[in-house]
Amino acid sequence: MASNTLQHLRDLVSPSEIIERDAPAYKDAAAPWSPWADQRPPLVVQPTSLDSMSKVVKFLYDSDLDFAVRNTGTGSVSAKDVILSTHGFKDFDFNESAGTLTIGSGYDWGTVDRKMEKEAPGWQVVGARCTWVGVTGSALVGGLSWLSHEYGMISDPQNLLDVQIVLRDGKVIWASEQPDLLWALRGGGGNFGTVTALKYRARQYPKTVFAAVLFFPYSALSDVSKLVSRMAARTGDPRIAMHVCNRGTAFAEAPQGAKPGVAIMMFDAHGQQHARSDDGFGWFFKHPDAVEWAGGEMGMADVNSLGDSFKHWQGENKFWASAPLLAEIDDETVNRAWKWWEDCINVHEDFQTGSVVLLEFMQEVSIPTRPTKSITADSRQAAMSSAGGRSKTAWPHSERRHVMQLGLGRKTEGAPPSIREMAMKQFAKAGPLIAGPEKDTKEYHAGFLHEWNDVREVYGENFDRLKEIKLQYDPENRFNKGVNLTDEKVTAKATV
């Protein structure tokens, strides 16, 4: 029986590594981002040593218990019986001479940002743009960074150098010892074992950059849509980046209904003067309706903290996300995204209280014959094509793409039973509608998938190899949350 098996698990580790359902620490250790996914398992196991983790992984794999591996919970993973938390792994080793950072899988990127500023000033790794996102999950699904325009995606081989992982039999290895496994971990979803540490490439980078958020009213939407198109059309500078987002509760404002204003989140590593010039974001600053909500020269930790107002949704909103990829941005792209938002609010008015439309704009970098201060020899053509080909990582990406990150949610209390069905129907419409006529790529970011996504399509020509590796390392399909490669589907209640 499960109760007896759980007691055997308790006996396997130190009492300090067990968090019971009635413990004060339980919520933070077990609650997923979206309460919809929460299965409130009776036990969280949080090993603090490799020896303990090794015992727990082997025990869980050989048991009948339903379990899920998690760190920060951003991915909304849960399970019926046990949460296996990696939060106890907090090693931090910056090696300046080697240009590497090795960190435990229990960190979130906000903590890493602060530690880098203190222990490795003038150095950066390609990490997530949100403080609450875990260092592991973001790498295993091909995450994006403010530095991606210059150095590529988090999971790319030039950034994610190695992964320490506990295999199903409890054996601890660095994945570079088994290259097929390391390849699969770079964007393949992570269901091959339990990650305990990651080695990233560290690079010298300005200690401070310019970052700002500009607000525009809804009446300026068409102008902003054209300005975003102009940015997309020009040759890119890899040290500037931009997000386009709707205003409202994501910025701790009141809901703005079906026709919200626009927020431009900007990043310029050249500094404030460049950002305010026409070589940076001068077009936006000069618009008569632009209002600077936040901005200035700051360290990377403060840059990423600008988005912390989004975090208040965690654990409070029933929330789901999808991220279709766009090949082009034209004068109407942002207008069409706002039309999709308006349609969503018309379907369910309370979506305005906990939802987001966020265009992650990707520059197309033109590489000169000789490196410059802005474009180094380490730069690639663009964030999505930086790995050197579609076969270089498990999740294939080789062409310029913009990420249309969409989130639909609302407060849990009073939510109708059909709320998730409403969200899924709206997500399924989003790609073709926002991309425009005959421009839908039918591609999706691997970090935000649902049952209606075709897993074979997402991983394309790499899928068969990825599934073969999955069967080698997890023949019983016990690591099955999120992207379930064995059954060729996405597991419900295991993704945002």
Image (cartoon, grey):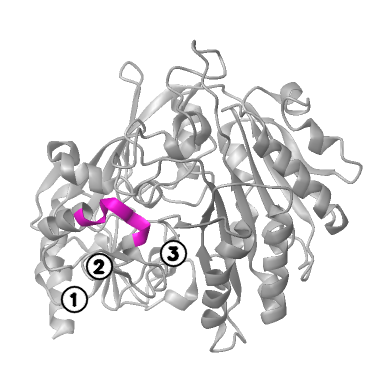
Q: Secondary structure at mark 3?
A: helix
Please give the name of the residue rendered at 28% of the width and 42% of the height, measured from the top-left corner.
391
The mark that comes first in sequence, 1 or 3, is 3
Residue 97 screen position, x and y as percent = 32, 15
Q: Which residue is mark 2?
A: 480
Please check the rendered image and state whether residue 462 is part of the magenta-colored stretch, yes or no.
Answer: yes
Q: Residue at x 62, y 51 (%)?
A: 359
Q: Amino acid at mark 2?
A: Asn
Query: Which is nearer the eye, 4 or 483?
Result: 483
Q: Amino acid at mark 3?
A: Asp
- Give the number of the disc on residue 28: 3
Residue labelled with disc 1: 65
Is residue 132 something that shows in the picture?
yes
Left or right, 473 with respect to 371, comes to left
Secondary structure state at the residue bearing disc 1: loop
What's the CA distance linking mark 1 and mark 2? 12 Å
Residue 316 in view (yes/no): no
Q: State the CA–CA distance, disc 1 to disc 3.
A: 22 Å
Q: Residue furthest bottom?
A: 417
Nearest to the observer: residue 337 or residue 281? 337
- Bounds of the magenta segment: 457-464
Q: Residue at x 12, y 64 (%)?
A: 12
Q: Given the current orientation, which residue lies at the most extreme front position?
A: 438
| 63 vs 108: above or below | below
Secondary structure of the magenta portion, mostly? helix
Which of pointers 2 and 3 lies earlier in the amino acid sequence? 3
Q: Quadrant of the N terminus?
A: bottom left
> Which residue is at 41% across, 40% downward?
398
